[in-house]
Image: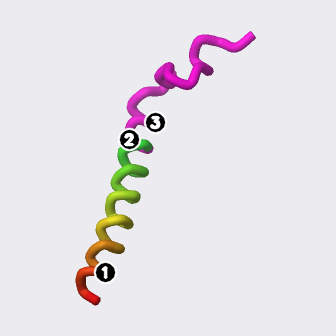
């Protein structure tokens, strides 16, 4: 039996840390995408 926190759409018990990690991940993806687009424009 799975506990209630192992569901995919349920928030993790430690909310702030995981939220910060997800924000950092999204920021890194956005920065990488922006860098690629900027290099394409510079070429």
Instruction: Determine which of the numbered discs, if any, sits on residue 20 in the image.
Output: 2
Q: Position of residue 6 (x, y in %)?
A: 62, 21
Q: Where is residue 13 in the image (x, y as percent from the top left)?
A: 50, 21
Name the residue rendered at 50%, 22% in the picture: 9
Instruction: Determine which of the numbered discs, if any, sits on residue 12 in the image.
Output: none
- Quadrant holding the C terminus: bottom left
Residue picked out by circle 1: 40
Q: Which stretch did the figure color magenta?
A: 1-21
Residue 21 position (above or below residue 3)? below
Circle 1 residues within 10 Å: few <14, some 14–19, many ≥20 = few
Q: Distance between the residues labelled 2 and 3?
A: 5 Å
The one nearer the camera, 12 or 39, is 39
Circle 2 residues within 10 Å: few <14, some 14–19, many ≥20 = few
Q: Where is residue 38 in the image (x, y as percent from the top left)?
A: 26, 76
Q: How far apart are marks 1 and 3 (CA)?
A: 33 Å
First reached walking from the N terminus: tag 1 or tag 3? 3
Residue 21 position (above or below residue 8)? below
Assign a secondary structure to mark 2: helix
Assign a secondary structure to mark 1: helix
Q: How far apart are marks 1 and 2 (CA)?
A: 30 Å
The one nearer the camera, 41 or 29, is 41
Assess whether mark 2 and mark 1 are in contact (beta carbons under 8 angstroms). Answer: no
Name the residue rendered at 43%, 44% in the picture: 21
Name the residue rendered at 59%, 20% in the picture: 7
Quarter holding residue 42: bottom left
Circle 3 residues within 10 Å: few <14, some 14–19, many ≥20 = few
Assign a secondary structure to mark 3: helix
Disc number lying in front (1 or 3): 1
Residue 4 position (above or below residue 36)? above
Instruction: Determine which of the numbered discs, if any, sits on residue 18 in the image.
Output: 3
Assess whether mark 3 and mark 2 are in contact (beta carbons under 8 angstroms). Answer: yes
């Amino acid at each position: 039996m799975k506990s209630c926190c192992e569901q995919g759409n349920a928030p993790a018990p430690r909310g702030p840390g995981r939220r910060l990690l997800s924000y950092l991940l999204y920021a890194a993806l956005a920065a990488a995408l922006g860098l690629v687009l900027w290099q394409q424009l510079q070429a």
